[in-house]
Image (cartoon, rainbow, N blue to C red):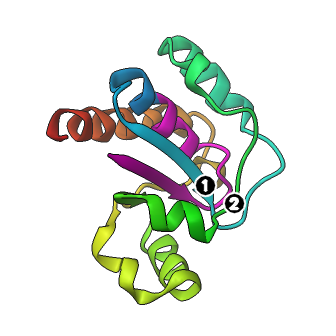
Amino acid sequence: MKILFVCTGNSFRSPVAEALLKKLRKDIEVKSAGTEPASHIASNAKELLKKENASTYLKERPEGLNEKTIAEADLIIVMKEKHKQEIMRRYSSHVGEKIKVWDIEDPLFLPPGHDKIILEIIKKKVEDLADSL
């Protein structure tokens, strides 16, 4: 099973989800990518994952989407509907059936402290996903 998490910058939401799922399910191949990759992983993502004992699973730097990663994924989890639309626009409408939208806000655009709330939302969804696979 190969799972791909996608957000905009690949600096907080999708790499956090990737790290948390890797911690829970070492038997699954997990990656993350961004539709518009940032230059670095968010420092608050690093700090919050340390508290979850999952920082060793955090990637070094954000990555962009590519056709190979999209094609190889059995399940693509996007943080917002706009990410699904962007994947379908770039890589064909045939991938739509393997995309699931979680509808998680970007903490970059929320007031300070919301990153912890977003982490908890992602953590719960990742735990549910890990149990269902």
What is the residue that sits farthest to the right in this orientation?
Answer: 39
Name the spot of residue 80 as percent of width and height, x first.
Answer: 45, 66
Q: CA distance from mark 1 to mark 2?
A: 5 Å
The answer to whether residue 118 is seen in the rendering is no
Instruction: Please state which amino acid type lies under the numbered disc 1.
Output: Ala
Q: Quadrant for residue 115, please give it.
A: top right
Image quadrant in which the C terminus is located: top left
Q: Which residues are magenta?
A: 1-19
Compare marks 1 and 2 and give the one earlier in the sequence. 1
Find disc 1 in the rendering and name its residue: 33
Q: Is residue 27 above or below residue 50?
A: below
- Asked whether 69 or 13 is in front, the reply is 69
Instruction: Name the secondary structure under disc 1.
Output: strand
Q: Quadrant for residue 28, please give it.
A: top left
121 sits left or right of 52 in the view: left
Instruction: Name the secondary structure under disc 2.
Output: loop
Point out which mark residue 64 bears.
2
Q: Is residue 48 above or below residue 35?
A: above
Q: Quadrant for residue 126, please give it.
A: top left
Does the residue at mark 1 contact the one at mark 2 (Cβ under 8 Å)? yes
Label 2: how many Cα within 10 Å (few below 14, some 14–19, many 20+)? some
The answer to whether residue 112 is seen in the rendering is yes
What is the residue that sits farthest to the left in this orientation?
Answer: 132
Tell me if residue 42 is in the magenta stretch. Answer: no
Point out which mark residue 72 bears.
none
Q: Residue at x 73, y 58 (%)?
A: 37
Name the spot of residue 40 as percent of width and height, x first.
Answer: 80, 42
Q: Residue at x 50, y 66 (%)?
A: 70
